[in-house]
Amino acid sequence: MTTESGQARLTGTAVSPYAGRPGGIHIAYESLGRPDGEPLLLVMGLGMQMIMWHDDLCTAFADRGFTVARFDHRDVGASTHLHEAGRPTILRMMLRPGRAAYRLPDMAGDAVAVLDALGWPRAHVVGISLGGMIAQQIAIDHPERVLSLTSISATASPRIGRLSMRTAMRLQKLQDRPVENGEQAGQLMVDLFDLIGSPGYDMDERWLRERGRIAFDRAYDQAGRLRHEAALMASRDRRAQLAELRIPALVVHGEADRIWNVAGGRATAEAIPDARLMTFPGYGHGILPRALWADVVDGVAALAGR
């Protein structure tokens, strides 16, 4: 296994190099906020680096008394990339999902390793898209480590709310586009969220271009993104396990989500006892529009009694 070098630094953060995992996997992470704050772990989506959690959103959480941590999944950014696992094809994912190099419980274990490295016995966990499904898996596999669960733009089952074939084909064509430099990566990020983002809100194109360029400089890995997709396609229906949870939970979903439509969010909220569901017209997928930050921060703070 090889480890991509380099770490993004957020002004005012305490940066810890890596959390260790079996098999020589290292998970890069960083934290923001007062060390005595309420611990909050942010889990990003498929193929996305921790830098896609907007610095200002992290600050908004910190201002509510949270100590915020975010991290790079395996196969993205400054964490270990499993190059030797190869480049899975969509056909192989569909016909042999069990052949995935790793699955969501493994990625949930990576997140728990970050908690261990931070010295956090428990944390509030907020995940978006694939990160929302990983957050669900953390709560299922490690309930003693989770103070509250917030699942954003996610589903409780890969069969519920899934994207249309037309959108899937457009998305695959877009993400398979060759990227050879930071400018192309920035344009790809803009084009991606033009397809899957929020039609009811202005797209911060400048920020997306910047994030794309920074992500390229940190580590651009198309095969790693496909290995994330394989892990997702190998996942199972989690509703029965979510029904066993006894933790405060919030489910946030966009009514204009083209990747996992709002049925996925509703199924998640219905599965978790006493979960609160928040849906927003015009909100799409993957990145929270700035206009919704206050509502989501308030919702997470309410789970924490803040």
Image: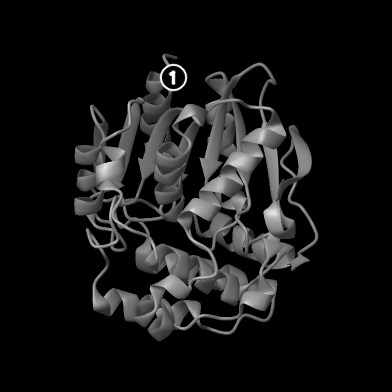
Label 1: how many residues lie within 10 Å, few (<14), some (14-19) or many (20+)? some
* Residue shown at 52% from the left, 47% from the top: 108
Q: Is residue 111 above or below residue 158?
A: above
Q: As drawn, is 195 to the left or to the right of 165?
A: right
Q: As drawn, is 83 to the left or to the right of 123?
A: right
Q: Residue 269: horizontal and vertical position, in percent?
A: 24, 39
Q: As drawn, is 20 to the left or to the right of 50?
A: right
Residue identified by numbered label 1: 304
- The picture quadrant where one finds residue 233 is bottom left
Locate the C terminus by quadrant.
top left
Q: Residue 60: horizontal and vertical position, in percent?
A: 53, 29
- The one of 55 and 119 positioned closer to us in this rendering: 119
Kind of residue sitting beneath label 1 = Ala
* Residue shown at 21% from the left, 46% from the top: 267
Q: Residue 294: horizontal and vertical position, in percent?
A: 41, 30
* Residue shown at 79% from the left, 57% from the top: 6
Q: Residue 158: horizontal and vertical position, in percent?
A: 30, 61
Does dot 1 land on a helix, a strand or a loop? loop
Q: Is residue 44 visible?
A: no
